[in-house]
Amino acid sequence: MQSFRRSILLFILIMSGSYLFSQYQPVIINQFQIGADLSLAKSIIDKGGIYYADDKKADLFETFKNKKFEYARLRLFHKPDGLSSNGTVNSMPYTIALAKVIKASGMKLLLDFHYSDTWADPSKQTKPAAWSNLNFTTLNDSVYAYTKITMNIFAENGVYPDMVQAGNEISHGMLWPDGASWTGNKSNYRNFSTLLKSAIRGIRESDNGSGIPILLHAATGGSLSDTRIFIDSLVKYNVEFDAIGLSYYIEYHGIMSQLDENIAYLNSHYNQNIIIAETNYRSDGILPSGSVITQSQLPFPLTLQGQYDYLQALYRLTKKYPKVKGIYYWGGELIWAGDIGGSYSSLFNWDGKARKALNAFQDLATGGVSSPNSTSQVTIFLDSDSHLEIRSNAEMSPGNILKILDLEGRTIYQKPLTGNVTQLDLKSTPMGLYVVEILNKGNILFSEKVLLK
């Protein structure tokens, strides 16, 4: 039934296309944002958690900044129970204290309003207890007032956000049942949009809020049809926002080509920028219960190396599209501390030691890492006839492998490397941007992009 009603709504939206084009001009996001959700970091550190990076004790926030994570995302609950074991610690005082540490580290801040006392996601959008008995008009006024007051409190504390997320994974609406996107088989997007516009108005009318980018977040990274229904329905009701946020967890949202299809359409059909607002990748070799894909459909093994390779492949995929302006990793800070557990999707082991994937974006930015097996310097040359030459100033170490990958991370060429000069004829390879990698025992020793014209 839900699939049927989605199809009907999508048909209506297509047929009423004149509704889908708002005069609103979104705030442009210029910087590509590499970010991490660090919402539990303060609680972990307060409970004695210690982080290690590059073989020594490390400041978590400086480490993320040094590894090219320029943004931190923090969730905010209305009045949470404060239980770290549930992750529901993100009260106003907690979040402001954490935001101060983040800003001091040089990172920028994405504030994520949950509009709930607890977790808000596609399966639950529970109203704060303080709002549970309000009529719709009063609820709407409360959303506006709470949002504006919160933003002003952040400003007063010198930690005004650099971007704001109005609701968390609100594909099915917010503040249920009043703001659910559907009630039974009837669309309720009018009420949902009304509440969302009040939240956005609260942001815009706060101190310094007129030009801040506002992100709307859907858990629909692998479904173009669901993303279109979400965005087109909100645009129909004149919701003015600046970025489309997507959750993409491969085990729950489908293979990377589905994400690629989704982004390709968004990039060509909407003015808003696009952000991968949540993603991660497991390293324990086990697909969780409820996974929509099989082991054979994974682009990389669920290993420490696979986690690293996934992040680099996701980056390459998103960089194909000019309107994609960010990737945020979720749960990367999780380690064992008191009643807080680690995670196989974290960027740190349970004992606090950094995993290889923490370096994924830094390695892309620096063009590779030094080889533990050779001190040779590698250069590549591409002539006008698409002849590629890889040259090192010393003999390649035994076991080195040359790979050429497309921007989805697929290997289109692979061979062992020997000697110090290798030549390839790539005239039959379609034009486009590719990545040349040299690996040894699964470790990436060199990585550089080449453009075939």
Image (spheres, rainbow, N blue to C red):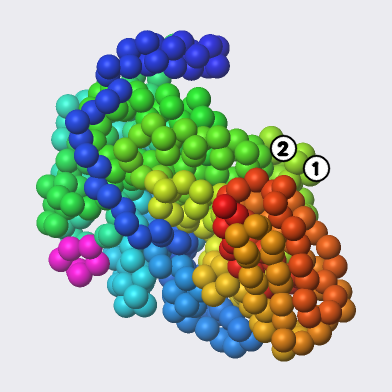
Q: Give the farthest residue toward the right.
A: 398
Q: Position of residue 269 (x, y in %)?
A: 39, 31
Res 250 quadrant in image: top right
- Element carrying mark 2: loop
Residue under the image location 66 percent in, 58 percent down: 386
Query: Does residue 59 show up?
Result: yes
Q: Position of residue 347 (x, y in %)?
A: 60, 66
Q: Most prominent secondary structure in the magenta stretch?
A: loop
Residue under the image location 57 percent in, 52 percent down: 453
Residue under the image location 71 percent in, 77 percent down: 391
- The three-letter amino acid code for the residue at tag 2 is Ile
- The number of discs equals 2
- Which corner quadrant holds the N terminus? top right
Q: Nearer the viewer, mark 2 or mark 1?
A: 1
Viewer-proximal residue, 92 or 373? 373
Q: Position of residue 324 (x, y in %)?
A: 43, 48
Q: Residues within 10 Å of mark 1 (few under 14, many from 20)?
A: few
- Element carrying mark 1: helix
> What's the CA distance linking mark 2 and mark 1?
8 Å
Q: Position of residue 371 (x, y in %)?
A: 71, 82
Viewer-proximal residue, 253 or 423? 423
Q: Is residue 442 above or below residue 453?
A: below
Q: Is residue 263 above or below residue 158?
A: above
Viewer-proximal residue, 79 or 411? 411
Q: Which residue in the protein does label 2 denote?
A: 293
Q: Which residues are magenta?
A: 155-160
Q: Which residue in the protein does label 1 denote?
A: 296
- The three-letter amino acid code for the residue at tag 1 is Ser
| Magenta segment includes 218 | no
